[in-house]
Image (cartoon, rainbow, N blue to C red):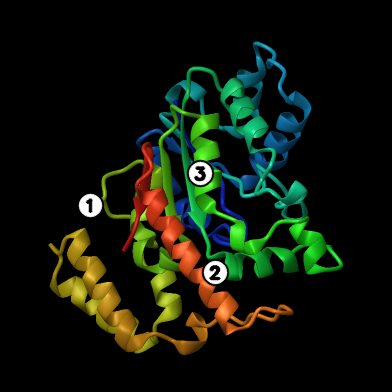
């Protein structure tokens, strides 16, 4: 069995990838691709990993987990898609000890031990720390931003460091990464990649996110373009998406408010530049696939 494990990060996806795939659950099931609802596994996996720690699972652990997660006979499932942005940490502990997801080295190998013999593929969407940190902070009970940071300096945080740690924890697991800021333009490809299906296969909801950031007129014209050009390839489609976004983008959908003490425009710009440089570095890391527009 191949396991697709989508790890977030927090405040990027808001379960949209999972909901998008669930729109296609009937069609995908025909090919042995199983997409269980999150209530079937999120709490179960978190509690199991917390209890397991660094111990060896019981021989029947995999069978018990799959019995709880699946309605189907596990022998008929070729791919199991799991999405769990809190698997590595709940938001309030995302920077515990001043380090991103410090339990990563414990949780991911434990996940592999729970599913011995199964292939695991990791999917991670990233986000500019200039918007990621305020967003995650707002979802926590922390009384101050400094308390949430737990000693971390935003200027010194790097996603590449976390990605390298994932590669070390699960060196045989293919790792797919993208920037949350790009998701409206690559949404269809993300759905295809997570489901493990061909990019030219029709999938429902491939432009759902794009429709949220362009005007109704723009979306209507884009769909008319697709209807008139049914053979357009993925690269050409991306160029068209960017052209339509440039002309029909909704300003309110593209803006984010930042309200943190000391975070002026220059500080945010520097964080953004560091993020862009870091993403370029991630794209050159072995074993990592970076999806870009």
Q: Is residue 180 toward the left or the right of residue 61 in the image?
A: left
- Residue 20 in the image: state x and y as whole percent: 46, 57
Residue at 51% x, 57% y is: 126
Q: Which mark is residue 157?
A: none
- Which of label 3 and label 2 is nearer to you? 2
- Which of label 3 and label 1 is nearer to you? 3
- CA gap between label 3 and label 1 equals 29 Å
Question: Is the residue under label 2 in contact with that under label 3 (CB below 8 Å)?
Answer: no
Q: Residues within 10 Å of mark 3 (few under 14, many from 20)?
A: some
Q: Which residue is mark 3?
A: 163
The residue positioned farthest toward the right in the image shown: 143
N-terminal of the two: label 1 or label 2? 1
In-front residue for pair 111/40: 111
- Which of label 1 and label 2 is nearer to you? 2
Q: Is residue 146 visible?
A: yes
Label 1 SS: loop
Quarter in which the N terminus is drawn: top left
Q: Which residue is mark 1?
A: 200
N-terminal of the two: label 3 or label 2? 3
Residue at 56% x, 25% y is: 112
Q: Which mark is residue 271?
A: 2
Q: Quadrant of residue 71?
A: top right
In-front residue for pair 234/147: 147
């Amino acid at each position: 069995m191949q396991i697709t494990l989508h790890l977030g990060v927090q405040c990027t996806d808001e379960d949209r990838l999972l909901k998008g795939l669930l729109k296609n659950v009937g069609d995908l099931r025909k090919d042995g691709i199983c997409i269980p609802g999150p209530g079937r596994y999120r709490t179960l996996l978190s509690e199991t990993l917390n209890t397991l720690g660094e111990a060896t699972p019981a021989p029947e652990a995999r069978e018990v987990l799959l019995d709880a997660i699946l309605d189907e006979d596990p022998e008929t499932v070729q791919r199991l898609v799991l999405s769990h942005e809190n698997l590595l940490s709940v938001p309030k502990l995302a920077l515990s000890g001043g380090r991103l997801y410090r339990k990563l080295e414990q949780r991911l190998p434990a996940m592999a031990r729970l599913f011995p013999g199964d292939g695991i593929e990791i999917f991670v969407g990233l986000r500019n720390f200039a918007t990621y940190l305020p967003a995650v902070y707002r979802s926590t009970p922390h009384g101050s931003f400094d308390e949430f940071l737990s000693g971390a300096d935003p200027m010194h945080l790097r996603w590449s460091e976390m990605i390298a740690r994932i590669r070390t924890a699960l060196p045989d697991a293919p790792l797919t990464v993208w920037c949350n800021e790009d998701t409206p333009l690559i949404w269809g490809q993300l759905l295809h990649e997570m489901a493990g299906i061909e990019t030219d296969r029709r999938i429902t909801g491939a432009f759902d996110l794009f429709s949220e950031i362009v005007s109704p007129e723009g979306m209507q014209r884009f769909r008319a373009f697709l209807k008139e050009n049914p053979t357009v390839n993925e690269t050409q489609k991306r160029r068209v998406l960017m052209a339509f976004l440039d002309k029909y983008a909704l300003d309110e959908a593209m803006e984010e408010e930042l309200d943190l003490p000391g975070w002026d425009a220059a500080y945010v710009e520097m964080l953004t530049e560091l993020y862009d440089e870091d993403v370029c570095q991630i794209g050159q890391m072995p074993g990592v696939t970076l999806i870009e527009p």
